[in-house]
Image (tube, helix red, strand yellow):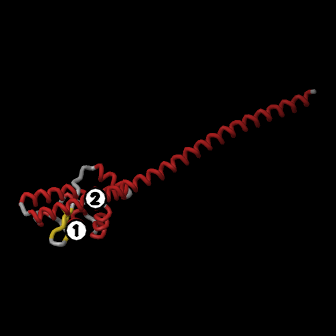
Amino acid sequence: MKTLELLSIRSLSRMVGISLYTAANWIEDFDVYIPKTEERDATYYYPDAVDVLKRIKKWKAKNYENAQIKIMLANYALPTNQNHAMKETQTTLDHGNDKENMLTIMQTIGKTVSNVTNQEKIIHELQEQQRKQLKRIKKLEKQVEDINELKQEIATLKREIASNNYETSKASFARLFH
């Protein structure tokens, strides 16, 4: 991989129009979706990372939470670190250095396992949020049921009051004319 094709975090933040601090936070929060590589003990980002961060910026502007953005990124067909790692592995394999090939393969496996673990954590967080929302929905349904019962009781009481008022008025008029 040519380093000229890769971007530093500073270049990435300038291209997206965000601060270096924001770029670093988003890269940390959405690590799985930011295509990157390690070159000469430094992290560089593939040009695809610009598109990913621009999408995140757009969704952040619409006040989406990180969990929601992760779902949207997962549903959007973005190149992930695994795709780039697989390309790097294939490139290394094509060059024929067995020791280097094995190291690259092991690193790719490690990255993939790490990414799967991150995805499992995200899924667990989303399942927990869904469980909490279902509890809230059940609570709201119970409240609606209670409100409807109270409405029925009020209607019944109104009918009883109206009936009692009619009977009282009828009795009063009857006494007046007897």
Q: Is residue 156 above or below residue 118?
A: above
Instruction: Give the Cα separation between the discs numbered 1 and 2.
Output: 21 Å
Q: What x and y, as percent, mark residue 63?
A: 38, 57
Q: Is residue 170 above or below residue 125?
A: above
Are the residues at dot 1 and dot 2 in contact (C-beta closer than 8 Å)?
no
Q: Amino acid at mark 2?
A: Asn
Q: Is residue 77 above or below residue 23?
A: above
Quarter of the figure that contains the N terminus: bottom left
Asked whether residue 162 appears in the rendered view, the answer is yes
Q: Amino acid at mark 1?
A: Ile
Q: Which of the 4 image quarters holds residue 70?
A: bottom left
Q: Which of the 4 image quarters holds residue 167?
A: top right
Q: Secondary structure at mark 2?
A: helix
Identify the residue at image location x=88%, y=28%.
Answer: 174
Crowding near pointer 1: few (<14 within 10 Å), some, many (20+)?
Answer: some
The residue to which callout 2 is attached is: 115
Q: What x and y, as percent, mark residue 124?
A: 39, 55
Residue at far top of view: 178
Residue nearest the observer in this picture, 25 or 18? 25
Identify the residue at image location x=37%, y=53%.
Answer: 123
Give residue 9's mark.
1
Quarter of the figure that contains the C terminus: top right
Residue at far bottom of view: 41
Give residue 126's mark.
none
Q: What x and y, as percent, mark residue 47?
A: 18, 60
